[in-house]
Image (cartoon, coloured by chain):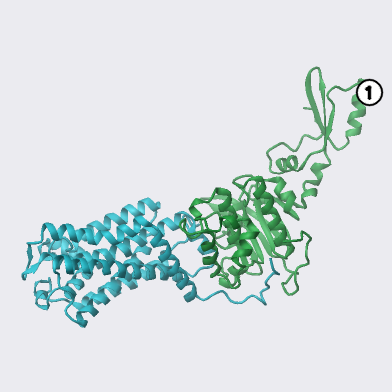
Chain colours: A green, B cyan
Amino acid sequence: MTTTQVAPAPPGTGTDRPAVAVRGLVKRYGGRAVLDGLDLDVRRGECFALLGPNGAGKTTAIEILEGVRRRDAGEVLVLGEDPSLAGRGWRDRVGVVSQGEGAGQALSVRETLDHFARYHARARSTEDLLAAVGLQESAGSRVGRLSGGQRRRLAVALGVQGRPELLFLDEPTTGMDPVARRQFWELIRGLRADGTTVLLTTHYLDEAAELADRVGVVAGGRLVEVAPPEELGAALRRETTVSWLEGGARRSVRTQAPAAVLRDLLAVQAEIPGLSVTRPGLEDVYLRLVGATPTTSEGALR
Amino acid sequence: MSALLTPATRPAPPSTASIALSRVRLELRLFFRERQQVVFSFAYPVVMLLIFASVLGSDERPGGIPFAQYFLAGIAATGIMLTSFQAVGTSVAAERENGQLERLQLLGTPPVAYFAGKAGQVLVTAAVQLALLLPVARYGFDVPMPADPGHWLTFGWVAVLGALAGTVLGVAVSALPGSATSTNTAVSALAIVLQFFSGVFFGFLELPGWMQQAAALFPLKWMTQGMRSAFLPDEAGAFEVAGGWEHGRTALVLVAWVIIGVMVCVRTFRWRRGEG
């Protein structure tokens, strides 16, 4: 946990094969396809973030990869095995930060960690885990008395307890305060530096930008784009929005050639009131990728 | 944080037996921390004995058996059913609802280890419950204890088989659809009806025939009968339905329920709600 540098994956882990390989994954609920031909590759040792609106199928996809939900069609390999058939040895190699409770509200944090240590081939020590998630001072508190954020930290500690090769996190920082979130990010960077592959879903774009080597955007049950966070939506990013005031009303135009738009404007007027020239940020790109805002307005004045 | 374990350096996960043992310890610890549950489990048979034996203490059952002696057998069996069937059915449904079972599934916990944890906890709490009940009957109401090691042995196997049958049936019933609250209600209602049908409060022979036949399908009737054979004099067996204690049939019915229960558990047990 001292370095955030990416360590090369240790030898012998089959780094040539991806940690997760999904082709044509389909899952239907009552005839409605939640996942509709999802393809996904997560490389060994990378941190991959799945972004998408509620109902896009992120959680369903993760649950199928975890081997706790059946799929209707498609091929899925996680650490080289089909999760729906994999056994206990495979489960011990996979960690999940689950939303569910620990082992009961009446146990203390330390007792909970000590108990679940016995399920793993080689568990991290309780002291290390308490320190890593910042729960040392609450170690003796009963789980029932923890705050929501503290419970999330305990869930994270339980998820990494078995030294997983691959860690699944479904909206891990929901309910955490900003300090806890940053501490959590450090923890994830540390795990990744140790060579752990991380697959997380999140609503927070800053989280994806902060942690992920690559981001996949899910919409309508498919992966619509995969790229490093700074390159996401490359075509969309080349578009610049030029905006100005005309007769008291704001007008704007999206263009790949903002200079030409400006030249045209300057040709008819010497000064352009309220002028702004902006490039889309990650959030704009994301919103347009998932279809929350129109993407086909190129050059058209609004 | 230390280096990553690779498939080559990672040992096999702990055995089912060692996880089962950890679960027994955990279940016991959690049980004794739930004060309400502890008080209810341990006080219910004692309080019922105090009430019924005090009110009806002068009554006699067929064969000149004092009421308290007859009632002790029934309430001992009832206590075992409550700590096994009712407590397990309720707690499994609650653990499924709050996501504890989901975590066990994600950890690859063998279901058998989970069942064994419940069974271990039930056996220990049933033993404590009986250890509190019997002295109250012995010293409070002069109920004789089982006459010899043979009768104690009967008491022992009836208690253990009854507790195991109750445990697996509790796990099985928790698979019924509905919320944990509705499971709790259904299990409690069934437990109350079975107590009346199985000759706990009334002499079994005084019950209408259809009630006797319905009760004979369930383990509680056989547990109370088995308990009577341990606590009552041998000649009182003449006042049973079959004119004897039917130890063979009692054992058969209880073992059959354990086996049926295990099969139902294995087929219907779910770690989470709305699997699909």
Q: Examine the image and state in which quarter residue B45 appears.
A: bottom left
Q: Position of residue B55 (x, y in %)?
A: 12, 57
Q: Residue furthest top?
A: A247
Image point 36% across, 60% down: which residue? B89
Residue B207 place in picture, x, y as percent: 12, 61
Label 1 is found on which chain of the structure? A
Residue B265 picture location, percent across and down: 39, 67
Q: Residue at x 79, y 42 (%)?
A: A236
Whether residue B177 is visible, yes or no, is yes
A87 relative to A245 in the view: left or right: left
Does dot 1 land on a helix, a strand or a loop?
helix
Residue at coordinates 59% horizontally, 53% vertically from top-left? Answer: A59
Identify residue for label 1.
A267
Q: Is residue A291 above or below residue A301?
A: below
**Is residue A122 positioned above or below A72 on the image?**
below
Taking depth in this image into account, of A32 and A241 the one nearest to the observer is: A241
Q: Is residue A246 above or below residue B265?
A: above
Residue B4 drawn at (x, y percent): 69, 69
Residue nearest the observer in this picture, A285 or B143 = B143
Which quadrant, please, contains the N terminus of chain B?
bottom right
The residue depicted at 24 percent of the width and 66 percent of the height is: B133
Q: Quadrant of residue B163?
A: bottom left
Q: A138 left or right of A251?
A: left
Instruction: Look at label 1 and name its amino acid.
Output: Ala
